[in-house]
Image: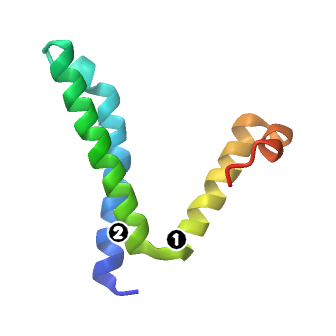
Amino acid sequence: MSRLKRTVGLFLFWASWLLWGLMLLIPFLLDADATTITVTATALLVAAEVSFAVSLLLLGRPFYRVFKDKVKTLWGRIRGREKAEVESLD
């Protein structure tokens, strides 16, 4: 995997998480009506989703597998082992 591809992929991966977090703060940061806040939050959500998808394409299947395994582990801690096995994320 080329160094530039990996760097851009990791940047987009972390940018997507920051955009998702920023979306939660928008109603408290903007002094605007509900329509403006809704449009801004939707635009941030779309940008975060596109950024996340492109980052997974750039980083490839090995990164996706490691990420998926870590999410499964975290999901197991949050929900408990029994429920996590019944409600698989696959």
Pointer 2: what residue? 9
Vertical relation: 59 (above or below) 49? below
Residue 82 image offset from top left, x and y in percent: 86, 40
Of mark 2 and mark 1, the one earlier in the sequence is 2
Which quarter of the figure has residue 87?
top right
Q: Are marks 2 and 1 in contact (CB under 8 Å)?
A: yes
Amino acid of disc 1: Phe
Please tell me which residue is depicted at 66% across the width and 46% down the height of the picture: 74
Vertical relation: 1 (above or below) 26? below
Q: As drawn, is 55 to the left or to the right of 63?
A: left
Please tell me which residue is depicted at 67% across the width and 49% down the height of the picture: 89
Vertical relation: 19 (above or below) 51? above
- Mark-to-mark CA distance, 2 and 1: 10 Å
Residue 32 image offset from top left, x and y in percent: 13, 15
Local crowd at mark 2 within 10 Å, few (<14), some, or many (≥20)?
many
Please tell me which residue is depicted at 70% across the width and 51% down the height of the picture: 73
Pointer 1: what residue? 63
Residue 70 image offset from top left, x and y in percent: 63, 57
Colour pattern: rainbow
- Which image quarter is the C terminus in? bottom right
Please tell me which residue is depicted at 15% across the width and 22% down the height of the picture: 36
Amino acid of disc 2: Gly
Q: As drawn, is 79 to the left or to the right of 27?
A: right
Which quarter of the figure has residue 6?
bottom left
87 or 25, which is in the foreground?
Answer: 87
Residue 18 badge: none
Q: As drawn, is 45 to the left or to the right of 30?
A: right
